[in-house]
Amino acid sequence: MIHISDSAQEHFAKLLEKQPEGTNIRVFVVNPGTPNAECGVSYCPIDSVEDEDTRLKFKYFDALVDDTSVAYLEEAEIDYVTDKMGAQLTLKAPNAKMKKVSDDASLIERVEYVIQTQVNPGLASHGGNVTVLELDDQGVAVLQFGGGCNGCSQVDFTLKEGIEKQLLELFPGELTGVRDITEHEAGEHSYY
């Protein structure tokens, strides 16, 4: 479920040496399954362990995950990187904003998962996002842009050269294209 690199494990072990005996770490997601999902790591004293917690055993400690966060931490990675600028703990949880869907899930669920976990993080850096509204009978994903993408002069390029290419590559024979139904005109609804 969660991969913790050797360097991160050693980092946590050093931190835990200064805590009361039996303290482990807790990995969690706040606001799981939403665009505002945030992942975190904290100390987990013995008296904070819940019966429903999932216990992951590592070399120097256990990592505890609350029942709600488990599905959102699939494929999560924690690393501790040291470079010229110092050291940094990184936590990557690609499923925090949306639970991972199974390979046999419906096409629209799989497309929504890719949009939420791969496309929207890139658009968010420009204040934008995209939503899947439906899949039509011809296998076209009908999308709507929001935020910084609404009214953007590059939205057609983003749609055809970015999103459509990526989705057609991931879903060959299932998806035939994408269509934007956003009203990209100046007005109160536009992002300016």
Image (cartoon, rainbow, N blue to C red):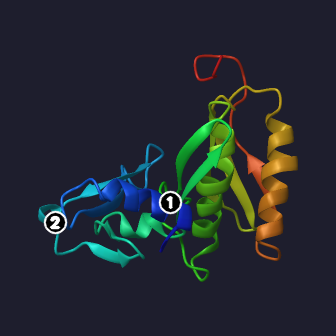
Q: Are marks 1 and 2 in contact (CB under 8 Å)?
A: no
Q: CA distance from mark 1 to mark 2?
A: 21 Å
The residue that disc 1 covers is: 8
Residue under the point 16% across and 61% down: 48
The residue that disc 2 covers is: 46
Q: Is residue 59 visible?
A: yes
With respect to residue 120, does 75 lie above or below?
A: below
Q: Is residue 176 visible?
A: no
Place residue 192 in its image quadrant.
top right
Q: Secondary structure at mark 2?
A: helix
- The first of marks 1 and 2 along the sequence is 1
Residue under the point 69% across and 53% down: 142
Task: Looking at this view, name the residue that lies furthest to the left.
Answer: 47
52 and 45: which is toward the camera = 45
What kind of residue is marked 2? Ile
Q: Residues within 10 Å of mark 1 (few under 14, many from 20)?
A: some
Q: Position of residue 57 (x, y in %)?
A: 37, 78
Q: Position of residue 167 (x, y in %)?
A: 77, 62
Q: Secondary structure at mark 1?
A: helix
Residue under the point 30% across and 75% down: 54
Residue under the point 11% across and 63% down: 47
Q: Is residue 158 left or right of residue 98?
A: right
Q: Position of residue 168 (x, y in %)?
A: 82, 65
